[in-house]
Amino acid sequence: MNARQVDDASRRLHDLGAQGIEDLAVSVVAIGLALTATQVRPELAFPFLLGAFGVGFLGMRAVVRRFFLVEDLAGDRDAYAIPAVRRFGLRATAPRHRHELARSIRATASLSTVVDRFRAVQPELEELVAVLEDDDRPLDPCAVVTLERWLNDPGESFRDADAPVDELRSRLRRGLTELDRSPIP
């Protein structure tokens, strides 16, 4: 990602946030008008309520789109210049989240369908779990986000029972190396 793309993404995040707030505020006003209309002009209550739901939907859509954009950008190291992406990445490196990832790895490794594959990479799995559970060890937020995506994607080699063990071992070692990169300042 170059500087222009980072600026464009930052602007898009700002626009989506502002749009979400504006739409939700208009929705609240329209609900208030609908409630008031029930007493003053009942025939206007339903149109105001319908408008409130429509604008509220648009506001929620903007909020969700903003969240997904932040989540997508968190996989790109350059995007951490954007404060929202940095906050997302820092949440990913929080001890609670790291322990949750470690539990997920242990749970997946104990599944009967993949347990034989994981025996072959037991040292790498144990090292990865130890790194995630070491609260004093600073981790690169972008690497944690990338690791979590890989762990949760059913089509990737971690959960795919048919994927070659060498591919799994290679990906685990690469993940460990990336986690130890110097964290984003």
Image: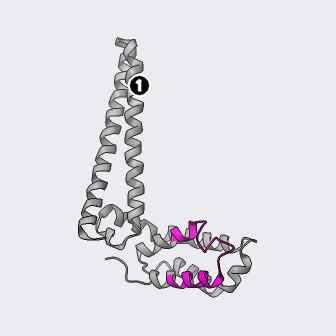
Q: Is residue 12 left or right of residue 147?
A: left
Q: Tag 1: residue type?
A: Leu
Write the residue at 34% across / 27% down: 30
Quarter of the figure that contains the C terminus: bottom left
Write the residue at 26% across / 56% down: 11
Instruction: Look at the image and say whether residue 168 sits in the magenta stretch.
Output: yes
Write the residue at 38% across / 64% down: 73
Element marked by disc 1: helix
Q: In this view, does 2 lie above or below 47?
A: below
**Pick the front one: 56 or 72:** 72
Q: Quadrant of residue 4?
A: bottom left
Read off the magenta span. Answer: 148-174
Specify whether residue 94 is in view. Answer: no
Q: Position of residue 147 (x, y in %)?
A: 50, 73
Quarter of the figure that contains the N terminus: bottom left
Identity of the residue furthest to the right in this view: 112
Crowd around label 1: few <14 · some 14–19 · many ≥20 (10 Å): many
Q: In this view, does 90 lie to the left or right of 9?
A: right
Q: Is residue 117 above or below residue 48?
A: below
Write the residue at 61% across / 70% down: 103
Q: Position of residue 156 (x, y in %)?
A: 58, 71
Q: Indicate the colouring scheme.
A: one colour
Q: In this view, does 131 lie to the left or right of 67?
A: right
Q: Which residue is tagged 1?
A: 49
Instruction: Look at the image and say whether residue 131 sits in the magenta stretch.
Output: no
Specify whether residue 61 is in view. Answer: yes
Identity of the residue furthest to the bottom in this view: 123
Q: In which quarter of the image is residue 125?
A: bottom right
Q: Where is residue 82 in the image (x, y as percent from the top left)?
A: 29, 64
* Total tally of numbered discs in the picture: 1
Q: Quadrant of residue 54?
A: top left
